[in-house]
Image: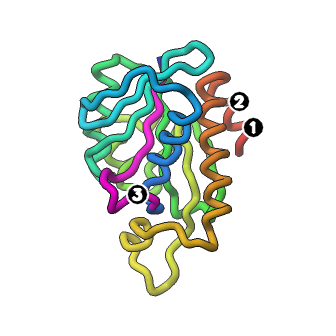
Amino acid sequence: MKIIIGLGNPGQKYRDTRHNMGYTVVEEIARRYAIEKEECKFDSIIGHLRINGEKVLVVKPLTYMNLSGKAVQALVHFYKQDLSKIIVVYDDMDLEVGRIRVRANGGSGGHKGIASINDRLGSSEFPRVRIGVGRPPEHWAVESWVLSKIGTDEQAVMEGSLQKASDAVICWVKDGIVQAMNKYN
C-alpha cells in the first residue's frame, strides 16, 4: 500500500489558492482512478483507490497547512507505513511557477507544512513532489501570496504543472521514486 498526501487548507475560501496545490493533485489522481471508498478520519479526508492493482490512499489533511504533521503522523502510525511508502505533494515558492521537483527526501526549505511533518515524524526521509508557485512580488507578504488565487495569466502554466505532478506521483506508485525523479525532474 502507498499513501499520497496532498497538503492544503480545508474550505472553499482556500480552494484554488497557491497553498492548495497538493490538494489539487490529490483531486486529479482521484478523478483519474475510481475511488472505492471515502472516509474522514485522522483529521483527513481519505480516498481508497487502486493504481495498477496496488491499494493507494489519497489524503487531504484537514488540520490546515501549518499543522499537517498531526494528520500525517496519525496515518503513518495507524497504517504502520515505512516512510518510503508515502509521498507528500505541496507548493513551493522557491520554484518558478509551473516547475515541479520530485525528491526522495529533504528538509522543509521553510515550508511550515513540511516542517510540521518532519517534526511529528522525527524524519525528513520521505518522497515529495514540490510544485512551483514562485515568489511574491515585492509589495506582497508571503502569507498573502500563498493564500492568493492563481492569476489568469498563470492558469494554463499551472494546469500543465498540476497534470505533470499528478503523472509524477502515479509514476512513483508504479515504478518508484528513482524512476519518477529521472522522468520528471
The image's colour scheme reads: rainbow
Q: Please give the residue where the numbered disc 1 appears in the rendered image.
A: 183
In space, the residues marked 2 and 1 are separated at their CA atoms by: 6 Å
The amino acid on which the numbered mark 2 sits, given as a three-letter code, is: Gln
Q: Please give the residue where the numbered disc 3 appears in the rendered image.
A: 15
Q: Is residue 8 left or right of residue 69?
A: right
What residue lies at 30% left-to-right and 54% top-to-bottom? Answer: 11
What residue lies at 52% left-to-right and 81% top-to-bottom? Answer: 137
Name the disc covering residue 179, or none: 2
Q: Which residues are magenta?
A: 2-16
**Could you say which quadrant of the image residue 145 lies in?**
bottom left
**Could you say which quadrant of the image residue 19 lies in?**
bottom left
The amino acid on which the numbered mark 3 sits, given as a three-letter code, is: Arg
In the image, residue 108 lies at what x, y percent?
A: 44, 50
Disc 3 element: loop
What residue lies at 46% left-to-right and 26% top-to-bottom? Answer: 35
Q: Visible in this render: residue 83?
A: no
Q: Nearer the viewer, mark 2 or mark 3?
A: 3
In the rendered image, the residue lying farthest to the right is: 183
Nearest the viewer among 149 and 85 is 149
59 is higher (above) or lower (below) than 151: above
